[in-house]
Image: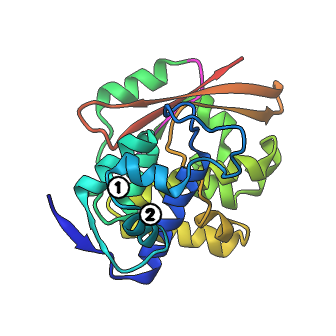
């Protein structure tokens, strides 16, 4: 078991604030804890989390207050199990504690030929992303839905945040943009804090001031299936189900397919 001191105050504060957020949204009933008739605490009490994590209440209180104390991998593991954190929350917890697996960011390379053939055979809009959110390949239907894909070196973050045409073509742009930002932030924090993705996020924050507040948003969102309503002159407003597929041989590659209906 390894233990390290969280030396940077900012890191300690972000970690403690996130754990407090997880504690307050946890359900006592789902964790087998009787809330009692006079419970006023939102979520779990500190002493209940301390018990679940196998530490003393004083130590846990210091931890949640962001004090300069030793935090072990074993404690983080017990915290994950005790609070029943999902995969995205686990990854975020370890990233804030400086313990997330550091997967190197893959260099830009050619898309496997089989994937290009596959998306070009699809009637639905489909494109391929890497961990920098660069659009590596796309089919004709995706180009019709996102005309900016035809520009040099398209990146989906730039499309969503910097394209006026995209803002006009998506229902509730701010909600869509916020979720996109949180997903990209999650990729950045859990994927090795790559400088290219960080520069893109900084570019977004500079161009869209409201995005600055989203960086500290406690909600954790990882890239995955979702729904989106987009406007196309030929068809009008259409609701799409977005399916996100990962290529097993190169997990940094994601295939995004938009199915209408």
Verify CB contact (< 8 Å) between mark 2 and mark 1. yes
In the rendered image, residue 128 lying in the magenta stretch gets the answer yes
Question: Which residue lies at the image location 56% right of the left edge and 43% below the top edge?
Answer: 26
Question: Can you give x and y, in whole percent of width and height, for residue 189 in the image?
Answer: 41, 60
Residue sitting at 68 percent across and 35 percent down? Answer: 145
Query: Which numbered disc, 2 or 1, marks the residue closer to the eye?
Result: 1
Q: Which residue is mark 1?
A: 191
Of residue 192 and residue 257, the one placed in the foreground of this image is 192
Relative image position of residue 104 (x, y in whole percent)? 25, 57
Residue found at the very far left of the displayed protein: 1
Above/below status of 113 relative to 25: above
Q: Which residue is more in the foreground, 177 or 72? A: 72
Q: Is residue 26 visible?
A: yes
Q: Which residues are magenta?
A: 123-130
Query: CA gap, disc 2 to disc 1?
Result: 10 Å
Q: Position of residue 220 (x, y in %)?
A: 54, 50
Is residue 154 visible to the viewer in this orientation of the structure?
no
Q: Which residue is mark 2?
A: 197
């Amino acid at each position: 078991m390894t233990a390290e001191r969280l030396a940077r105050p900012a890191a300690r504060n972000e970690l403690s604030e996130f754990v407090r957020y997880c504690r307050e949204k946890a359900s006592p009933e789902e964790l087998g804890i009787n809330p009692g008739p006079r419970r006023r605490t939102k979520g779990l009490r500190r002493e209940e989390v301390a018990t679940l994590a196998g530490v003393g209440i004083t130590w846990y209180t210091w931890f949640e207050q962001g004090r300069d104390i030793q935090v072990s991998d074993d404690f983080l593991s017990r915290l994950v199990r005790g609070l029943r954190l999902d995969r995205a929350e686990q990854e975020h917890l370890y990233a804030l504690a400086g313990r997330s697996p550091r997967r190197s960011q893959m260099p830009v390379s050619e898309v496997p030929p089989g994937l290009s053939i596959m998306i070009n055979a699809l009637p639905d809009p489909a494109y391929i992303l890497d961990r920098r959110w660069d659009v590596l390949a796309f089919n004709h239907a995706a180009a019709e839905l996102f005309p900016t894909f035809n520009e040099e070196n398209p990146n989906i973050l730039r499309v969503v945040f910097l394209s006026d045409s995209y803002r006009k073509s998506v229902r509730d742009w701010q909600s869509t943009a916020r979720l996109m930002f949180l997903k990209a932030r999650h990729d950045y924090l859990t994927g090795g804090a790559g400088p290219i993705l960080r520069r893109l996020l900084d570019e977004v924050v500079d161009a869209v001031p409201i995005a600055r507040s989203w960086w500290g948003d406690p909600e954790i969102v990882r890239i995955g299936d979702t729904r989106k309503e987009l406007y196309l002159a030929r068809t009008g407003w259409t609701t799409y189900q977005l399916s996100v597929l990962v290529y097993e041989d190169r997990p940094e590659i994601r295939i995004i397919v938009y199915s209408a209906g």
